[in-house]
Image (tube, rainbow, N blue to C red):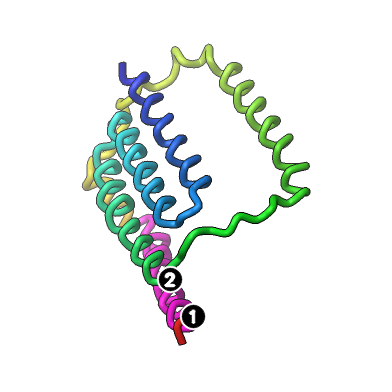
Amino acid sequence: MAQYLFLFFAAICAGGAVNLLIQRKTINSALSLIVVMGSLALIYLLLGAEFVAVIQVIIYAGAIMVLFVFVIMLLNAGEEEQAKGSRVAKIVGIPGLFIGGIIGIWVLLQHAPLQKTMIPIGALYGPADQVGMMLFTKYLLAFEVTSVLVLIAIMGAVVLARRSHS
């Protein structure tokens, strides 16, 4: 049953990602991204990573998406203009998409007999204290660099919005 739920939420996640790409209004794309983040949280929950699922909802679906919506409103982004697709992108991209899909299906079919030796869903998880210790010891530099990058992005959005209205 858990595998069917996993596939269901994965389909919702993929559908939200496709919807994010085809939307013409940026606010609708942001709402589609919230659907993607929520379905990812449910997938993490199915995998037994409760801490990561809660963090996914609080940080990404909550705080980061509020930041995205704030920046979208700050920049007053309207409807996206539709441009003609690049010929090179069509010539290389469409065959590349099919080749990548065929390779992905081939890899999945080649590794199908290994499913008996795979670890069952939810068997591996890390308690919140171990995840926190690893985040603030081993990965502290990456954590801090990410927070500085987010701060720089916010400042850049404010500068861009101020220049356009002057």
Hey, which quadrant is residue 93 in on the image?
top right
Q: Is residue 99 left or right of residue 26?
A: right
- The mark found on residue 5 in the picture is none
Q: Secondary structure at mark 1?
A: helix
Type of amino acid under label 2: Leu
The residue shown at (25%, 51%) is 58
Residue with the mark numbered 2: 75
Residue with the mark numbered 1: 164
Q: Which residues are magenta?
A: 137-164
Residue 150 highlighted magenta (yes or no): yes
Report the quarter where the N terminus lies: top left
Whether tag 1 and tag 2 are in contact, CB under 8 A, the answer is yes
The local crowd at label 1, few if under 14, some if 14 to 19, many if 20 or more residues have their Cα within 10 Å, is few
Hey, which quadrant is residue 104 in on the image?
top right
User: In the image, residue 7 lies at what x, y percent?
Assistant: 40, 24
Tag count in the figure?
2
Depth order, front residue of 15/131: 15
Q: Secondary structure at mark 2?
A: helix
Whole-number angstrom distance, CA of label 1 to CA of label 2:
8 Å
User: In the image, residue 15 lies at what x, y percent?
Assistant: 45, 35
Is residue 50 positioned above or below 28 on the image? above
The local crowd at label 2, few if under 14, some if 14 to 19, many if 20 or more residues have their Cα within 10 Å, is some
Of the image marks 1 and 2, the number of the one nearer the N terminus? 2
Q: Is residue 98 left or right of residue 53?
A: right
Residue 11 highlighted magenta (yes or no): no
Q: Residue furthest bottom?
A: 166
Type of amino acid under label 1: Ser
